[in-house]
Amino acid sequence: MSNENKKQNAGGGQPKKGQAKKGQPKNGQPNGQKKTADRKGGSKKGLIIALVVLLVVAGCAGGYMIWQNNSTAGTLSRDTYYDGVSVAGVDLSGKTREEARTLVAEQEQKIQNETKLALVYESSRYELTGADFAFTFDTDQVLETAYQAGRTGTDEERLAAIEALKVTPQNFDISYTVDASGAGARIAEIAAALDVEPVEPTIGEFNPSLEEKFVFTEGKDGAKVDQEALLAEVESKVAAKDFTDLVITLNPVSPLHTKEDLTANVRKIATASTTVTNNSNRNTNIRLITEKISGNVVMPGETFSVNETSGPRSAANGYKPAHALVQGEYVDEIGGGICQASTTLFCAVAKADLEIVERQPHGIPATYVEYGFDATVAWPSLDFKFKNNTEYPIYIEGYLDGLTLTYNIYGAPIEGDPGISIKLKSVYLGSIAQPEAKVTIDNSLNPGEEVVDKKGRTGHVADTYKVFYKDGKELKSEKLCNSRYPAAQAVIRKGPDATPSPSVTPSPNTPPPVTDPPVTQPPVTNPPASDPPATNPPAEGAGEGGA
């Protein structure tokens, strides 16, 4: 036995149960083999772990790639504005086209509300606002351009552009034009507030009773806005978006006439006179209505009416009873005789070449003028009217001097020529036969007795002409009117025939009765058939105020 074995034996002999011998693994395998096995097992586990990690990473990467692909596709296909896009300063990030249009429309309205132009005259300011102008915006085109931001190029270029917008936002400005041509109505309002009408020279006083009948007053310049020129200035400034104050200029405007014009056009252009009777009441009536007519001024374009000027001819107004024509007979009536005033005025007006608007002849020719020169009036139905058809005022002067009634007309020279005057001419066209008398039997009358209830008369027709003279020489003749004075039927009542006496047989010495020859009436001359329609007089009984 070796020393070694001895030592082992000395140490206790055989190892205890379950205890491996020194230098021998518990499982009975050598230590080297165990280490090799451990290394193989660890490698296998690591491989598994690595595979798992790799799979996880791959899954994450794949998922990320899928997510990234989906996110990119969503970004590229979105139908809203990309982040960082604005129009007219309005952020449209994530907005649809409809939302964007609404938002920018508000900006358009803001621009219109803030657009103002002041028109200034001295201390007055008149403001034109956006409501006075027409705006045209390019908003729709700009919105489309802004929408295309990030939507051009390849996908990579688009993504880069989209990301760039987030870093550097992009604003797209809108532009617009302004049309001020519709501001004319507003400018007209402003002009109406600023315009000062010129003052025409006038006759401050017309008093026919004075020696100096007319008192003249000077005219005065006015000032007006040249609306067309002002509108052009406004259009120019607004088109250039220049909204600084615009100063209004008023241009001087002279009166249409000067005092010299007026003086030259206020002269006596016509006169007419008639002779009145010695009847005091009749002359009172003529004087009263003449005082109403005299002193009146008829402006250009105005119509003068005798009835409107004089009013009712009543006892309360001072008129007296005097002869007037009623049913073909002269009877006393309040205001009788005033037709002589309207007749004399008619003659003066016709000789002044003024327009006759309304005129009627009497039923019977007047005794104080020629046929066709008369003009009857009766309140309120029959009137004499004339119109001032000149460019200057017409002044009427009338007066009764003794037994002479005169009317003068003052105004511009006839046809603008101081050398022209007018005379009236009556042309008798013929008579109208008196109708056969209306005879009735009145048993209350004695046989052979006869009563004339209404006188008959022959009628007449005449034309009236205006004859123009230049420095005393006849120039022309114009027909003024036609007058028809109707015939009247006599109305007669006769007593019954006498009862005849018994017949007596004449003796041979009794001479035969003497028979008077019949009276032959002269023939009645009728007016020519070619005459124009005549002016019929008023119906008899109208109360014509006296012939």
Image: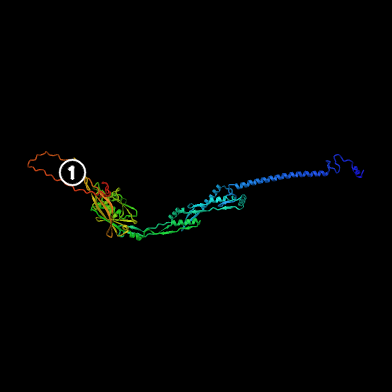
Give the total number of marks visible in the rendering.
1
Q: In the visual, does 497 lie left or right of 258? A: left
Residue 168: x %, y % from top left? 61, 53
- Judge whether residue 264 can be spotted in this image: yes
Residue 477: x %, y % from top left? 28, 55
Task: Find the residue positioned furthest to the bottom.
Answer: 260
Q: Which residue is mark 1?
A: 450
Task: Find the residue positioned furthest to the front.
Answer: 154
Q: Amino acid at mark 1?
A: Glu
> Which part of the image, by quadrant, shows the N terminus?
top right
On screen, residue 539 above or below 467: above
Residue 418 sits in quarter: bottom left
**Residue at figure coordinates x 65%, y 45% from the top left:** 67
**Residue at figure coordinates x 80%, y 44% from the top left:** 36
Task: Find the residue positioned furthest to the top.
Answer: 502
Residue 205 sits in quarter: bottom left
Residue 102: x %, y % from top left? 54, 48
Q: Nearer the viewer, residue 110 or 527?
A: 527
**Tag 1, which secondary structure?**
strand
Q: Nearer the viewer, residue 120 or 357?
A: 357
**Residue at figure coordinates x 54%, y 48% from the top left:** 101
Q: In the visual, does 250 lie left or right of 381? A: right
